[in-house]
Image: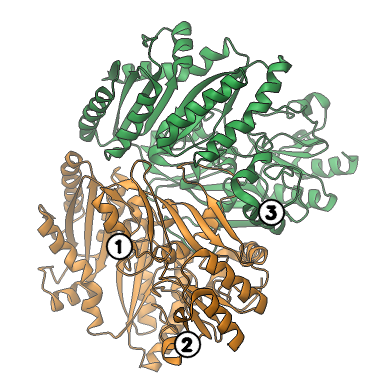
Chain colours: A green, B orange
Amino acid sequence: MKPEIISQLREIVGKEYVFTEKEDLFCYTYDGSFLFEQPSMPGVVVLPENSREISRIIKLAAACQIPVIPRGAGSNLSGGSVPLAECMIIQMTRMNRIIRIDGRNMIAVVEPGVVTGVFQEELAKQGLFYPPDPASLAFSTMGGNVAECAGGPRGVKYGVTRDYILGLEVVLADGSITRTGASTMKSVAGYDLTRLFTGSEGTLGIITQITVKLLPMPQARQTVLASFPNLDQTAETVVEILSRGMIPSSLELLDQVFIHHIEAFMPSGLPLDAEGILLIEVDGPKNALNDQISEIEKICRDQGAMQIRAASSEDERERLWAARRGAFGAIARNYPTILSEDVTVPRDKIPQAISQVRKIAEAYQLTVAILAHAGDGNFHADILTDEKNSEEMNRVRQALPELFKAALDLGGTITGEHGVGIVKAPFLPWEAGREGMHVMQAVKDALDPQNILNPGKMFGNRRW
Amino acid sequence: MKPEIISQLREIVGKEYVFTEKEDLFCYTYDGSFLFEQPSMPGVVVLPENSREISRIIKLAAACQIPVIPRGAGSNLSGGSVPLAECMIIQMTRMNRIIRIDGRNMIAVVEPGVVTGVFQEELAKQGLFYPPDPASLAFSTMGGNVAECAGGPRGVKYGVTRDYILGLEVVLADGSITRTGASTMKSVAGYDLTRLFTGSEGTLGIITQITVKLLPMPQARQTVLASFPNLDQTAETVVEILSRGMIPSSLELLDQVFIHHIEAFMPSGLPLDAEGILLIEVDGPKNALNDQISEIEKICRDQGAMQIRAASSEDERERLWAARRGAFGAIARNYPTILSEDVTVPRDKIPQAISQVRKIAEAYQLTVAILAHAGDGNFHADILTDEKNSEEMNRVRQALPELFKAALDLGGTITGEHGVGIVKAPFLPWEAGREGMHVMQAVKDALDPQNILNPGKMFGNRRW
């Protein structure tokens, strides 16, 4: 990076907030994704404090045609926040103020660097609820969640990030600052730019302020864990529950690979001969839940459940969730590298999707464990491997496209909640089609004509 | 319209589906909006049967640079479907098939000409629910609802049209056909084009197929009607109910003008000295509702309600709603022209908004009645007038901008659910700002470089 650019950046944000040392830059070469490629070193990392500073940074980057990569906690799972060589990383974590929580209007305004879990804890103190719950919520940021349109287990009942974003402040590719949306529950004043920027993975603008819609905290919740002799019955139970007019707040499915690892690591009394378990949670008005749980238990029995455990206290609930929460840790002891793919299918296609995944795993001699937010058809085919085993990694690399193709053949999508980034950029055209790619490219060109905002993400290195 | 264009259109859709006679064309000169301008005659009206025909029509229009206006039931309230002189109207009502209702996956696929109310009735037979409920649902179409992102009373609990649209098929300005979104509950594959087209008012593409998310039909509902001595108490009750963790499925507020007209037209026992009434409905699991209704009644009493009537049967519920449903009819007997404005404010600003509206009404000597979907701050300031009284209409024309300005000053939006069209195009820049207009113009230029899709709508006749 040219010294005069560095000195201008120092002038904008203060010199302690511009990193140029190799040791510092190295920390920004990766994110939560597994990448087959070697990482690149950014040219500079800059930590602004507000949108005016970002505006000046972007104007500088635009004038010098330097690629800009916005970054929150770096927990991205599709390579959306990894740098290009000699790029400028805008690290958003200093902008971490909760600006306003307004219980009377059920909205809140936050800066992008606010950690999602911290925000949720603050809300809970006031009986308020921001539902999106990506697994990363303890460290991932609201800005990253919006840029990626993060999902999570609660999606089946509460939807995903986009369903809660009312308005944004965004710094555009020319450094101008705009506001989208409104602070009201309803607004149709012009194009839905709020949702265009939500999920745009930093390729259309830098999100600098977020207005979200809140819900009241549900009065109560109840949890059931059920084990089934095979995965078809497990998956069919999910469809049955949802077809009967109930919408659980979570419907998590884990397969036998997970069950065995959990039992080996932290024995929870799960039946080892079960091929699938469901962790089912309902929430809402207190006196509506017993009936729902009874009906869910009945459905589980009718579908051949081997074991049904209901939590009648918060302690018991925690114990049931411990199995689910410990699942990745249990597996990570044996497999140093886990590729968590997030293909999603219509929910009644989950059994076929699982059987396809297994065929692919067998063909490429890979170990795959399955964990699904089954209620919304979002399932994580977790490939358990070791990146040091380059021969096996080659097979992983060959298997992935087949996994995406299988999901699309079943009427699904290549990414339910992790985003496209660079990991899935080669496969997005399979889903969006030529016309869809043309529309996205036209939008990208319209808003970022110099292609300086997170270039290469979503589109790869080709133009449409 | 040139004869060779007419003959090509006849070749595409069949000659019985191309209208060129003045008597036919006249029927397409207006929509549900009140317009101060004289209507224009379209050059031709064409009724296609499928997206392939629309693709050919758009290619023809693009080649000849003829403006194209898509039209559903023409119930638009912002002039979005009124023609330009010599334009081509694409009337979508022949494309009215419900293609698929899939209860296992809780999705449905419809053509744009399906009437929303008809669709909802079909769903109800299977215990399924598509919540958006614009007042026009008995005749407005799904395509129109999506193009305008229609709202309705249930918005407070269930959101608006955009919250239910999973995917679209769209014919673009060059005649190519694309698909956006997915058939799954979650998808983040690329930009959120689905929501970019939703609410784009026919200016970015012609929507030819719609995939929607469904909910299970709520098990039960209960209704309460409460009257209050003044509007502040009425509005404060709304905030109180929502702050206590309940989300009613409707929270409709009517003012004294409505109460008096309803009582004169169809006596319902509403207290004539009440200045506001609330019609409150809750839905959900049966045994959760009694508690909610008791708490709501208590809040109403605490807030000084003069009368509280609860419906304990479906018949009684119908009687309570009759007052709300008959409200417009009651007023229309005395006022031939009603301009229903849909400014929206943060819900705790409703009292100030109402007082602003009254000041403006007084200043311009206008009669205004207020009906609000108060739960989401979306309130209809209905100006009661007579378009034959040109002196009064002049005052209406002067008062409207002040109404929009008042809403924006209170942190609101100029349109909660009716759209921009031509009616609010001059005022959109007040809300979106220069940068926002530039972004919208860039998107419009990117997707419709010749400006043939519903030109003049949303942007007016100026370029940004």
Secondary structure found at label 1: helix
Same chain for mark 3 and mark 1? The answer is no
Nearest the viewer among A218 and A97 is A218
Q: Amino acid at mark 2?
A: Pro
Q: Are marks 3 and 1 in contact (CB under 8 Å)?
A: no
Q: Is residue B448 above or below residue B329?
A: above
Q: Position of residue A416 (x, y in %)?
A: 52, 38
Q: Are marks 2 and 1 in contact (CB under 8 Å)?
A: no
Quarter of the image with the C terminus of chain B is bottom right
Same chain for mark 2 and mark 1? The answer is yes
Find disc 2 in the rendering and name its residue: B39
Q: Position of residue A67 (x, y in %)?
A: 78, 44
Residue neighbourhood size for the residue with mark 2, other residues' Cα within 10 Å, grouped as few (<14), some (14–19), many (≥20): some
Find disc 1 in the rendering and name its residue: B118
Examine the rendering and report whether any part of residue A34 can be seen.
no
Judge depth for marks 3 and 1 and give the one in front.
1
Quarter of the image with the N terminus of chain B is bottom right
Residue neighbourhood size for the residue with mark 3, other residues' Cα within 10 Å, grouped as few (<14), some (14–19), many (≥20): some
Find disc 3 in the rendering and name its residue: A441
Q: Mark on residue B185?
A: none
Q: Position of residue A275 (x, y in %)?
A: 40, 17
Judge depth for marks 2 and 1 and give the one in front.
1
Whole-Å distance between the Cαs marked 2 and 1?
A: 30 Å
Nearest the viewer among B98 and B357 is B98
Q: Is residue A73 left or right of residue A372?
A: right
Which residue is depicted at the point 66% across and 37% down?
Answer: A80
Nearest the viewer among A419 and B348 is A419
Which residue is depicted at the point 43% across and 73% down?
Answer: B403
